[in-house]
Amino acid sequence: MVHTILHRYIFYSVEDIPLKFKAINVIFPIVMVFLMWVCCNYVITIGEAIKHSIDVCLTSIVPSMYAFMILSELLVRSNSHRIIGNILSPISRNVLHLDGKLFPILLISLVAGYPVGAKLISTLEDNGSIDTNVAKDMYCYCYSGGLAFIIGTIGGSLKVSLIVYISNVVANLTLAFMLNFKHIVPNKDVCKADVKISSNVLVDSINSSFKTMINVCIMIISFSIAICLLDVFNISDILSMAISKVLHMSKTSSQSILNATLEVSQTANVSMVGSLYLPTIAMIFSFGGVCVIMQILSIAGKSFNLKHFLKCRIFTSAVSFLICTILTRLLLADTLTTSYICNAKVTQEDSIVPSICLICMSFILLSKNTRHSSHNVL
């Protein structure tokens, strides 16, 4: 019996296995063992990368996103978004051809940041409150770096951060208009929207937000390790050299842009001279980076289409670059020169204590002893 099972699932015959799968069965374990050896051999270097990424999560990501996630989840689960949608329905339906109750999701995603919009759309999919085709498009434009995250990442003046943020928002709204223009104007929602608040709604909102926050931080740490490994094998140097030759920029600049494209929080380290610095930053934030896209993949619903998403994000990245270039020339004309470097960042020691307290409180709230049966609060 055991021999039969092993033969069936492990010891395949030559005829049963396609050539590519036979190659994967040999190569993949070897690669994994080799990477494990690398992790042991370069434990200090990788450890420093992990420490830095954890510091970024606790001092920037968690403070700027966690509260927004909880509140936005609570807004949707309590049905409050439909109340707001009824108020903004004329703008949503007539301009963007978007159902009024979905417009608050777009607004929240633009303010809160990347994974929040995808998480809310996924929640609506689970509840059966959104059409599959509409959700597929909304994943593409309910995707932006939050204002707090952008300010905390690039530092400098508030004016500079606002230029980058506005460029992203306008690009997303442009995409929303283009994708929804083919749709007919939705009918006004005549159903009465009642706000539903209970202890379970609150706990479920915190539970969902906490899990998403942990997922985001783990993905950031993982990509920091990946970037470190690229440096160890000098792969980043090779890629940076190729990018620098194509884009006619320094190797340092191209390497910092490559790292930021992989993990968007690395945008803080982008080193670039000249008038294209801000537009490049706006373009990176609009694309979001491979790490953020992986986060979206992990939390998005069944209607998410990666190919469609990437096409849309490449378009919005180009639009963000163009808009930021225009805004930079209009609003920073006095300070913008050929030697202008716009990467002055606020260097300060941020405390990780508030973030640790938030995480501990979430654990306490999510424990079985604090989970009560559902009862109305209001």
Image (cartoon, rainbow, N blue to C red):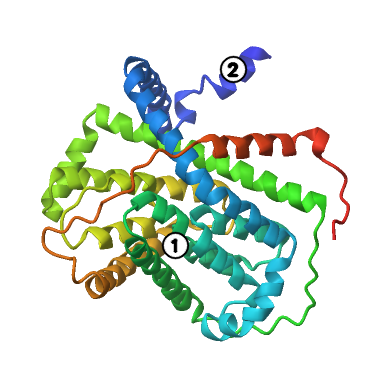
Q: Earlier in the sequence, mark 2 or mark 1?
A: 2
User: Given this view, does label 2 or label 1 mark the residue nearer the observer?
Assistant: 1
- Identify the disc placed on residue 6: 2
The residue that disc 1 covers is 308
Instruction: Check contact, mark 2 vs mark 1: CB within 8 A.
Output: no
Task: Please say if 209 is above or below 37.
Answer: below
- 144 in relation to 30, above or below: below
Q: Position of residue 165 (x, y in %)?
A: 39, 64
Left or right side of 351 for 133: right
**Dot 2 amino acid type:** Leu
Circle 1 residues within 10 Å: few <14, some 14–19, many ≥20: few
Q: In this view of the protein, can residue 175 be seen by the observer?
A: yes
- SS at circle 2: helix
Residue type pointed to by label 1:
His
- Direction from residue 259 to residue 104 in the image, left or right: right
Question: Furthest-front residue in view?
Answer: 348
Distance between mark 2 and mark 1 Cα atoms? 41 Å
Residue 78 shown left or right of residue 261 in the figure: right
| Residue depicted at 72% across the width and 67% down the height | 80
Question: Residue 250: x and y, percent?
Answer: 12, 47
The picture places residue 209, in percent across and down from the top left corner, at 63, 47
Q: In the rendered view, tell whether residue 144 sits above or below residue 8.
A: below
Give the quarter of the image for residue 279.
bottom left
Q: Report the residue at 11% width, 58% height from top.
A: 339
